[in-house]
Amino acid sequence: MRAVSLAASALLVTAATVLAQDRTTEAGEALITDPNAECTAYAIPAVTAIKSTYPTIWQHANVSFTGATAYDKALFAKMNGSIPNIKPKGTPTGDFSSVVYNATDTDCWWSWSKCTTPKIKTLPADIVTCPEPNTWGFTLDDGPNCSHNAYYDYLLSIEQKATLFYIGSNTLDWPLEAQRGLADGHEICSHTWSHPYMTAMTNEQAFAELYFSKKAIKDVLGITVKCWRPPYGDVDDRIRFIANALDMVTIGWTDDTFDWEEATIGIPSVKANYQNLLTAQTSGNFSKQGTIVLTHELNNETMSLSEDYLPAIQKQFSGGVMPIAVCMNNTQPYVETGAVYPNYVQWAAGTRTVSILAPTAVGTDVQISFTSGGAGTPTATGPAKATGTLATSTASPVAESLTALGTATQGYTGGAVSGGSAASASSSGSSSKDSAAASVEAAHALGLGSALALALAAGAALV
């Protein structure tokens, strides 16, 4: 029996090694926990096949580049005539020193006044809180980070799911890492194509930043997201209108850990910010409604800090720590109705299972179309709506692999996750995201009401 056990163990180790070296599948990529290996550039054929139809990685998006399709250009032309006549502000890097602006804040410019209720009455108000008492809306910006596997393993081990705001350029650079976020049952949202200050963008650029990030997630993960977060919090009613027309719900925050600024203010200051939130909960500050908190998977430090504080956060925030879709009772956060998340009552009762669509890169140019729809309701071809009780989640391939190998899912310690931005390497040889991309990021409205309802073109591939 001992000989058989040893042989079986050796076989399992060999199988794990083979799988860990497989950089063609989400399951194989998820087993790599050496950050140097994780952040070594790779390419998968399905993404290579569509990359020419996207703007240059980490450059501001538009629909005028060589590979832009006539379809994409026509979509922008269709929308452009109805975009509010609000001028761009400042520069893409956030220099607003030359901006002369109306003190009454006619544009509901968040960077000016932290305005969250649009002056254009047809636009939904920004969402910055979870409505239930003592709840923590758990969000992670700037992913997918190439070195996030150990941190995601930790989240699996404590059954914690989050809302992940993925940058389009990162999604194409690190497609298997992006797929893991969905496979693990997290909620996926957009964080623009290249992380600029959005109010500085022209109409064309703003459309493209939102459109191509949404499209990248569809092409790589197979889901059509309906939420986004403006980088640096920079949004006004012109940008809100474009996002709303693209059926992109905007999610904000109540509280900021300032983890993105750890290199400047120091780790002790970020820890103090986390502790202040725990103290505020103890003092009853969240006894009437919860909070949405800004945190990041930006680098080893931000992920390590999150891991350090999540046990205390889970213990103290008795209403629950959860993705935004859950706290807003949005059980179907994607256009594809085959993905079903728990509602708040289910989550509070302990349900953590999610019925998800297997993340798959389609390898063809998916055309996202817009149609006039009643009350802005999105429609799409795709899987039938799940019925009956909440389905058991499609198990994460990494979780299945770890179970099969008889190993415990472990979080990293002592900086096992490392690297700077998620774009520290790229399959196209693109440069890393500027470190300034870690700055404050805002957000807004969870709700429908688009003037244009989102639908998938008849030939869109769904999984």
Image (spheres, rainbow, N blue to C red):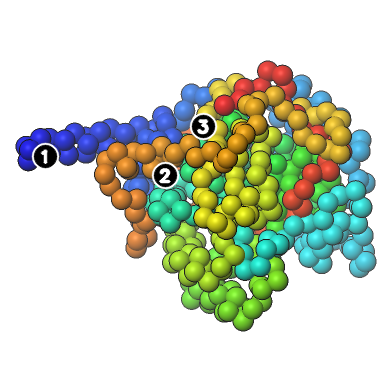
* Spot occupied by residue 260 in the image (x, y as percentages of width and height): 57, 62
Q: CA distance from mark 2 to mark 3?
A: 24 Å
Tag 3–tag 1 contact (CB < 8 Å): no
Q: At numbered mark 2, what does the secondary structure look like: helix, strand or loop? A: loop
190 relative position to 426: left or right = right
* Spot occupied by residue 37 in the image (x, y as percentages of width and height): 35, 43
Q: Is residue 219 visible?
A: yes
Indicate the amino acid at tag 1: Leu
Label whose residue precedes the other's in the sequence (3 or 1): 1
Using the image, tell me which numbered label, if any, was put on residue 358.
3
Q: CA distance from mark 2 to mark 1?
A: 33 Å
Q: To which residue does mark 2 refer? A: 39
What residue is at 91 percent from the left and 45 percent from the top? 84
Q: CA distance from mark 3 to mark 1?
A: 34 Å
Viewer-nearest of discs 2 and 1: 1
* Spot occupied by residue 308 in the image (x, y as percentages of width and height): 44, 67
Indicate the amino acid at tag 3: Ala
* Spot occupied by residue 178 in the image (x, y as percentages of width and height): 52, 40
Q: To which residue does mark 1 refer? A: 6
